[in-house]
Image (cartoon, rainbow, N blue to C red):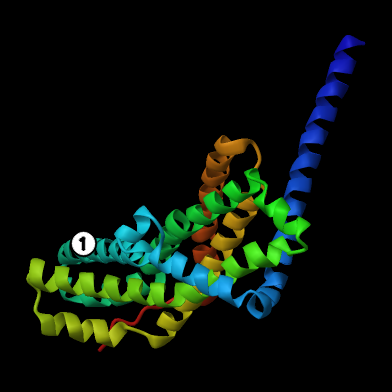
Amino acid sequence: MSTANDAIGSLRRRAGTAGRAVDAVGDQVLFYLRSVLSVGRAARSYRDETLRLISEISLGTGILALVGGSVVIMGFLTFFAGATVAVQGYHALGGVGVEAFTGFLSAYVNVRVVAPVTAGVGLAATIGAGTTAELGAMRISEEIDALDAMAIRSVPYLVGTRLLAGLIVVVPLYALSVVAAFLSSRITTVLVLGQSAGVYDHYFGTFLNPDDVLWSFAQAMAMAAVVMLVHTYYGFHTVGGPAGVGVATGRAVRLSLICVVTVTLLISLALYGSARQLHLAG
């Protein structure tokens, strides 16, 4: 009898845990829908706040502003990532005697994988983490409750404006990231590794597909939207005082990094999954 009661109790606890997990996912999805729908209201009613957030997200505040904000951080991240692609690609291709194709590798890999993923990581580590910390601090100090008490809709004002600002800022930020990746690959290949500039430019220009660049920007915007949604959710629902802000930021960064690589995988499968051939010609 005791064993049966223990089994029933264990089953109930597991069912309760599963039910709470489903409820949490449902609450998160509903929050995302509300946030997306609030972007229109944020654009109409809170333009000044959106402009302020655009400046804050791109140039940063406090210590982050001293180093140039997200612009410089993402630029450096993609710059060194592009240099790594050049070094690894040059030596790997040189092993089979085709190091001349380093320009092709830069045009192919940087646009499709390296620049988007690196930019997504930079978004999560700078813009996303800052958003969670800011909203979390507002939640534990009851500033969000004060907005609701003043009949200001907190989701459009705090979440919709940040989502809109993030989507606007990511376009020039990602453009800078792509240019930095291309520039670092060329500098590393030509000036450091000693390949002819003409050879590099020929293969780079031949295999740089404008459609890939456009899809890369679309991928960056999708990642920015996902990162902002995840981080605003955790910041908006922070509990537990100052320590809870740190916990929420850590959880948000962890989930947003998973989402970044997932978005990259899904978009790559949708765009390039059926491509079975790579024509090295030109």
Q: Is residue 180 above or below residue 73?
A: below
Q: Is residue 275 visible?
A: no
Q: Residue furthest front?
A: 150
Q: Is residue 137 visible?
A: yes
Q: Is residue 131 above or below residue 185?
A: above
Q: Position of residue 40 (x, y in %)?
A: 68, 77
Could you classify mark 1 by the number of other residues whose Cα lies within 10 Å: few (under 14), some (14-19), or many (20 or more)? some
Q: Position of residue 42 (x, y in %)?
A: 66, 73
Q: Residue furthest top?
A: 2
69 left or right, relative to 262: left
As rendered, which of 282 and 209 lies closer to the eye? 209
Q: Is residue 81 above or below residue 201?
A: above
Q: Residue furthest right?
A: 1
Question: Residue at (85%, 22%) from the top-left corner?
Answer: 9
How many labels were placed on the picture? 1
The C terminus, quarter of image: bottom left
38 left or right, relative to 170: right
Q: Could you tell me the amino acid type at mark 1?
A: Ala
Question: Residue at (49%, 54%) from the top-left corner?
Answer: 130
Question: Residue at (36%, 62%) from the top-left corner?
Answer: 69
Q: Position of residue 54 (x, y in %)?
A: 49, 71
Query: Residue beneath label 1, please?
Result: 92
Q: Position of residue 27 (x, y in %)?
A: 76, 53
The N terminus, quarter of image: top right
278 left or right, relative to 223: left
Q: Is residue 282 above or below residue 126?
A: below
Which type of secondary structure does the marked residue at label 1 adopt? Answer: helix
